Image (cartoon, rainbow, N blue to C red):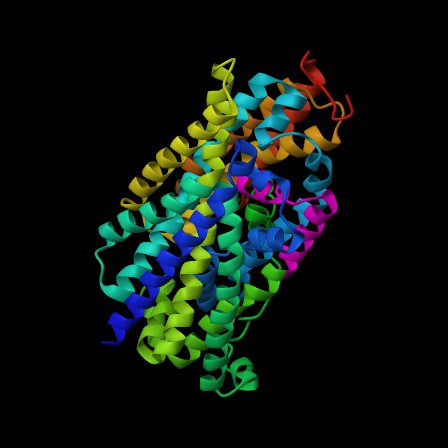
Amino acid sequence: MQNGILLAFILLYLVGTVLVGWWASRKVKTAADFVVAGKHLPMYMVACALFATWFGSETVMGASAEFAQHGLLGVIEDPFGAALCLLLAGLLIARPLYNLNILTFNDFFKIRFGRTAELTSAILMVPSYFSWITAQIVALAIVMNAVSGLDYVWGVVLCTSMVLLYTYIGGMWSVTVTDFVQTIAIIIGLLALMAEVVGAVGGWGKMLDAAPEGFFQFFPENKPINMVHWVAAWMTIGLGSVPQQDVFQRVMSARSMKASVMACYMSSLMYLTVAALPLIICYGGRILYPELLEGDTQMMIPQMVLKHSGLGIQILFFGALISAILSTCSGAMLAPATVIGENLVKPLYKNMTDAGLLRIMRYSVIGVAAISGSMALMRNNIYELVGESSAFSLVSLFVPLIAGLYWKRATGIGAIAAMVTGISVWAITNFTLPALAESGTLSENAQFWAEVPPMLYGFGASILGMLGGSLLFKSHAQQTLSS
């Protein structure tokens, strides 16, 4: 009976989300409305939207599971790296890009480096989102299965279809309005659950006393390879997600440059504080129900809530969890669809109208949803999927973006070289190094280099590609923002 009531409330919430998205869709008249909400949003709504960029399955289920198993060192990537990314968005990209009349990061690459760089960056950006979206769909399907027993496959189909619906009709207007509503639900639900868990343990003092030795250690042990992995964890989302289109669209949707910058800073602070709630909850669960550590730790918090909380807390928690995942998934689904329409399809037609571009972007949302839903049927490790997505953009797009903004000598050839060499070296080392590291046949020095995360090799190769391509070759397409 209780599960039936809980499921009814969840379905009611899902229907309400779609209705809010439909209401917001009435403001979509142009492609700019669909992509950046016509640049009409107040600072507080943009901050909520930026906060919701990653506060989904990665933080509530993936990061909390890592925290329960490995302590503070296990969650450097998220939430700390994610908060760093939002801070850097305000420091590095909001000001120089806000006043440009562009819809995507790739438009900037066209202005700064030329059409070939635009095309290359678009081709690399689009697939970087599939793993990220897949992680959110997987999480939604897992939650639906836990709550109602709905078969995983049908859960994937249902969740993909629902996110597709309100993203398709309303674009960034729907995403932002629903993000604002969902952020409120997230905070209320997690605060209520945290209060119950802390009370059940016996207070903050007992929680701290129960921590294993080194559980709250922030810096790694004094070994070079440990420090390398620690730095890589900061970079994965901290730098890797700076050139992501979903971040860009949210930053550019503010009604002024000042609002855009301040929204980045506020969302960074929100991420550090609110993201601590699921970590505290999962840590309390580790103390109260240690047996949950033996199963799928991604489901630790949901299982704890279902088994040991009242209906009111269950409704608040699952409303918050679904809110978080929906917020992340909708924005992530919109981002590659925007790039496909604006940077891959539009240049093929000389006289494409704004209405035609809007239609292409909406069709692209359907295609992105179909691919991501298919991937969700084949893979289900949330933390792994998220890491892949951020590493992909770090090794290919971060260096040319920052060099294009802040290095006048950067050229189109350098940008393309940075993208191609970065992604190529990352792919090669990602395939070869793990096997070498596990072989047990390497010398101590060689073992160290084999254990370096592949994305650092890709990132270094991207920097060398930019330097070499820009200094050795001149590009006729080179421009600066001031020109």
Res 202 visible: yes
Number of numbered callouts drawn:
0
Q: Quadrant of residue 110?
A: top right
> x, y percentage for residue 229?
55, 51
Q: Quadrant of the N terminus?
A: bottom left
Looking at the image, which residue is at 32% across and 41% down?
375
Res. 61 in view? no
As displayed, is residue 235 above or below residue 202?
above
Instruction: Farthest residue to the bottom: give it.
Output: 202
- In this rendering, the answer to whether 338 lies above or below 323 is above
Q: Residue at x 63, y 40 (%)?
A: 39
Tell me which residue sits at (49%, 88%) in the image.
Answer: 202
Task: Say whether residue 390 is magenta.
Answer: no
Above-or-below relation of 130 to 53: above
Magenta stretch: helix, strand or loop mostly? helix
At x 25%, y 65%, the residue is: 148
Task: Give percent across and percent down for residue 214.
Answer: 55, 71
In the rendered image, the quadrant that contains the C terminus is: top right
Tell me: residue 75, above or below residue 440: below
Extreme-right residue of the structure: 482
Left or right: where 226 falls relative to 59: right
Q: Position of residue 406 (x, y in %)?
A: 74, 32
Q: Nearer the viewer, residue 234 or 428?
A: 234
State which region is magenta.
243-269
**Residue closer to the observer: 165 or 117:** 165
Instruction: Name the residue nearer the viewer: 109 or 402.
Output: 109
Residue 263 in the magenta stretch? The answer is yes
